[in-house]
Image: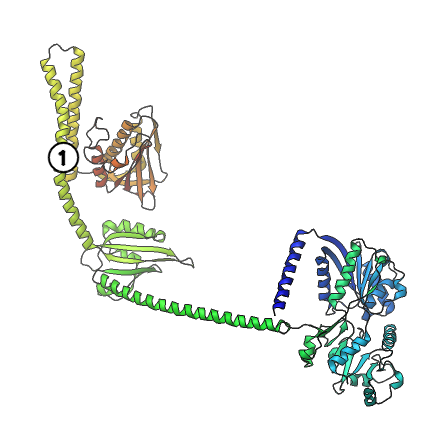
Amino acid sequence: MNKIYLNLIYLMTLQLLVLINSGCTEKEEHRVLVIHSYEYSYAAYPDFNILIKKAFKDKGIEADIRTVYLDCESHQEQEELDRMRMLLDSLGDWKPEIILVNEDQATYSLLKCGHPLPKQIPVVFAGVNYPNWELIKQYPNVTGFHDKIDYNKTLDVGLELLGKNIMLFTILDYTYLDQAIRADMKEQFRGRKVVGLAHLEFKRQKRDSMRKEGYVYFESIRARVVDASPGGFIWLLSKYVENRCYVQLKRDFTTVNIGNICASPSITAINEAFGYGEKLLGGYITPLNVQISEEVGEAVGILHGTSPGAIPVRESKKVYQIDWNVMQQLHISKKAIPAKYEIINMPFKERYNGLWMTLIVFIVVLLGSIISALAFLYWREQKRKKMALYALEDEKETLALSIEGGNTFAWKLQDDLIVLENAYWKWLGKKTRKVDIDELRNYIHPDHQELFKINKKNLALAKKKIVRLKCDFNGQGYQWWEFRYTTTQLANGQLKTAGLLLNIQEIKDREQELEDARRLAEKAELKQSFLANMSHEIRTPLNAIVGFSNILAMEDELDEADKTEYIDTINRNSELLLKLINDILELSRMESGNMTFQMEKCNVAGLVDKVYMTHKVLIPSYLEFIEERDDTPMEIEVDNDRLTQVLTNFLNNASKFTKEGYIKLGYCFVPEENQVRIYVEDSGIGIPKEEQHIIFSRFYKQNEFAQGTGLGLSICQVIVEKSHGSIELWSELGKGSRFTVVLPCHVIS
């Protein structure tokens, strides 16, 4: 067994080296003509042609092979010669570099037909049992292999495989080939006790007495019967004749398939049809692979420069072979076959029985291991699933307890209908049903209808969405509800929306309580802060007014320039004090609700254009003033003057803190939220991040020494919030700032 393994490893390594060498070596290209004697449908020819191609490739030659078939059994001699000339003429302009011809008929016809090609091109023949030596001598460019039949060893094959009492017969008529076979057999059987074809004087003796004297009965019968009845021939092939063995010595139309129709076992002395389903048990022959190896090896030598005339015709190598399939049909055991025989077509499991059993055991063990592993994995998975189910059940119970009484319900969207779980309908005291989205809208508070409409429109885009709306589901008044949902795309391309519906009224109530408490605290803090800031902000201009007024009253010797400067200072501080008081009063009126807002529909483009044109002459000339517009026509509902006040404040601040670059006024439409963003952007000094969260606080000034009350942005924030909007801020030190007013809007159709 170890020897078999080592041989397999050696063969695999050798093949790998051949592949590597063939991949690295440049292939030769040669034109090769192959001529076969028999019809193209002959069963062995497909393998024959493949092996020729492979043999050249193994020798490093990429052969351009043309194959022709003489079909010798369909023609008489002259017709056969004419057909050979026709086959050679059919090559046209394609001229071979060497010709490989197989078997007697094709070799004879090629050399006899008189075509000029065999005299011009080197020829190598093989599989020729009876070469025409006189004809071959006329061709110095012809060489090959003589497949000489050994009749004594063929006779021994029959005796060794089928027993000493076997009687052999063959099919021979009186053609040229048949006469050559008879003469050769008589010569080879000379001196051996063979009755029938040799020692004719004993032919009429009784068979029993001949066997006792050591004679073997080997006769020939005629198939081309002209003047006699064919009954004897048919009888010999039937099942009623015992201890007979047919011996194939030639292949022609009289012997084709004799092995199949003959009830007796059959052996062969030639390789034609052996191993290709014609029930030939075995023989002492030149195998097909040996014939091809010898023929191609000689051809490669000639292609590489060896003269055909320098290569003598040699006898082909022969081996004992037996067909496994026919062995099984004749019920011959492998043990009964002598060791010198090579068994072909033997299954792998029979040829390498030990290795086969090892593989079977290995596969059984492997399958057993796989099944065991799968069983273990299945058991472990089942155990894990049970544990998961237990955990899921516990989680379900815990979840049910946690949401019980909390008015939390699961829902999903199915065919544009909302499917709510049974607990919702039980809480509502109604029968379970599906709810249309438009029907759901009837439960929404009027103030939240627009938000509901926007979220419905963008439902397919939702990833993880949380929407809070006031709803009245049970007719007992509006309460705050939270819609949590997500939309995912399934494998079939459809969208799936599912989520939770939560009652958050208690949360909102607590938030309101906390907000009220916060506002009370803020008010107390704001009062204290307001008084402190007011005392500081009012004292500064008052000190200036009182101080410079005293100087004017007490100093009589002041010149006119100083008096003018002091008076201007008093006037500026008076104006600053007045503005401070006005801003405080305005902020107070806004927060107390005493100031009314004249809300009206306003065209965004017109408002921004108006503000831009007003400030176009006010912005310093060293700054670039840019207007950016959106092509979408929009309307907003605001107090026009108040919104203009906000944008004016933003522009004034931008001018104050921008020394170079640009100031930009513009707006853009946000279709996803139905909002407009009106912005003022500058390339000024920017606002530090730590100060951005207090920029809208009262009395905040980025530069304490800059002129102003510090209430402008606080007033802007109150105005925007009263308009149901918000202010967003982006700023970066050294790069500039961007103040954006975000307001709800609708597109003008």
Question: How many numbered marks does the figure carry?
Answer: 1
Which residue is tagged 1? 530
- The residue at the point 36 percent across, 60 percent down is 415
Q: Is residue 645 left or right of residue 140?
A: left
Q: Residue at x 25, y 33 (%)?
A: 644
Q: Position of residue 722 (x, y in %)?
A: 21, 40
Q: Quadrant of the N terminus?
A: bottom right
Q: Nearer the viewer, residue 35 or 365?
A: 365
71 vs 123: above or below: below
Q: Would residue 541 be found to the left or right of residue 398 on screen?
A: left
Q: Relative to 582, is 268 above or below?
A: below
Q: Is residue 91 above or below residue 242?
A: above
The picture places residue 651, in percent across and down from the top left corner, at 28, 30
Viewer-closest of 54 and 116: 54
- Residue for point 86% across, 89% down: 205
Query: Quarter holding the C terminus?
Result: top left
Where is residue 747 drawn, in percent x and y?
32, 43
Quadrant in the rendering for residue 116? bottom right
> Residue flagged by tag 1: what amino acid is it?
Phe
Judged left or right of residue 420, residue 379 is right
| Badge 1: residue crowd in 10 Å (few <14, some 14–19, many ≥20) | some
Residue 96 shows in the view: no
